[in-house]
Structures are given as structure tokens and as C-alpha cells.
Image (spheres, grey):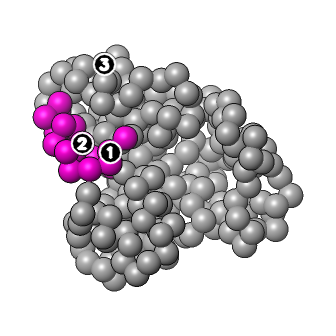
Amino acid sequence: MNVNMGVSSFSNHSVEDVVAAGMAIGPVHHVMQLYSMKDRKTEEGIIRRAEAAGCKAIFLTADSPVLGVRYNEWRNGFQPSPGLGYPMLNRSPEDIAQQSHDDGFNSFNSDSHSWAKEISWLRSVTNMEIWIKGVLTPEDVELAVEYKCDGVIISNHGGRQLDETPATIDALPACAQAARGRIRIHVDGGIRSGVDIFKALALGAECCWVGRPALWGLAVCLPFSCFSLYEHN
């Protein structure tokens, strides 16, 4: 299907299993959506596993130094479903059940993001491409160029992280203009159809990423529901 796949540090399945499943379908690129960790050994362990599994790039998550105020998750008492762990973080379902979602995230995630420290450290430990996920301003595109990142993903974390951020389709034109061909531009958020993809390409994106539509397809619980979603939308 030529649909690439990003695997989160907080994935409920290991990067090894996800990449193996993807490659069983056909040639596809996988990337690791990496969070900056308080423990560098934990972070480097994720990177090493991603490399060994065949991931081509790191998407460093820049928009979540701390969790935003997620009212819906608080109201519904969000917790991962029973039986799901965080294998990339060596956390079992039993470990997760003992903490709230917010506390579990905060126990790993570093809140001291720094262009100079993060990018130089990543360059010292991996040869994978380094992209910044969560860019919404031309100023951050310029910084990504300055620090010789391979690309940026114009993203607002699906609108879940901060509820007053601009739509990515609105932020895209200025970011693409700032790039001036010096750095690659991808976008996510609100992509629901081929028409949305054409709009993003016309406004300067090279590629679009989707999240919720794939989950909607899985929620239907029909054979090949995800495939059908991509084919018909």
C-alpha cells in the first residue's frame, strides 16, 4: 500500500513486532516517534531497538515536554486497556495499572527540551535521520535548518496536547515558505481524505501522516478494514 508507519516510544507493541508485521505486507518505511526521556539509557535503548528493527528515522516529539490539560481524558478516567503494556519502556500491564496515565507519562518524559542538547546528543548515538515532530512556526523551521535536522513534521499532536493550537493546515504555508527547499516538510492532523492530502501537497507538504483514521478502521473490526479505509477515502 506504500503507507509508512510511525511507532511511538509508548506503543503497546514492540517496534520489532510492528516492523515485522509491516514488512510482511510489503516494502514500507518505519520510523520511531521518540520522546525525550529523563533517563538517557532508556532513550538510547529505544533508539538501538529501532535501528536493529530497521527504522529509517527518528521523529523527535517536540510538542509534549509536559502533558497538556486533557479534560476529556480526565473526565473519562483514561487508562490503557487491560493487558496492554509499554514494551519499549519495559513496562508490563501490571506496572501500568498501578499509575494514572499522566503519572506514567511523567515518570519517563523529560520536561527540559533543548535544541542544542537534544539534537547533538541524538547525532552522537545514531545515524538515523532526525526529524522534529510538533513544529507550527517558521521560527522553529529555521531552527531545524540551523541544527541540520533532516525534516520537520507540522503537527499539533492531533489537537490533544494543547486545545488552542492552530490547525496544521493553517500553519503549513508559512512553515513551507520558511523552509525554502532547505529541509523536508511533512504534516499531520485532520487528514481525512485524498482531497485533504492534495490540499496539503499544494500548500507545501511533501507527505501526510494520519492517526485517527487508521484507528477508526481498526475499530470497525472487519477484515482489512484499515485497507478499505485507505482505498476508499
Give the camera-side residue of 130 and 73.
73
Q: Residues within 10 Å of mark 2 (few under 14, many from 20)?
A: some
Q: Quadrant of the C terminus?
A: bottom left
Q: Amino acid at mark 2?
A: Asp
Residue lying at 86% horizontally and 58% vertically, measured from the top left: 98
If you read the primary sequence from the N terminus, does the residue marked by circle 2 or circle 3 appear first?
3
Q: Residue furthest top?
A: 139
- In the rendered image, residue 43, in percent from the top left (x then y), is placed at 58, 51
Q: Which residues are magenta?
A: 190-209
- In the rendered image, residue 74, in percent from the top left (x then y), is placed at 75, 40
- 26 sits to left or right of 6: left
Query: In the rendered image, is residue 38 in sight?
Result: no
Mark 2 and mark 3: span between their CA atoms? 22 Å
Q: Which residue is under mark 2?
A: 196
Q: Which residue is under mark 3?
A: 138
If you read the primary sequence from the N terminus, does the residue marked by circle 2 or circle 1 appear first?
1
Q: Residues within 10 Å of mark 1 (few under 14, many from 20)?
A: many
Which label number is shown at residue 191?
1
- Reply yes or no: does residue 36 show up in magenta: no
Which SS class for mark 1? loop
Which one is closest to the eye, mark 3 or mark 1? 1
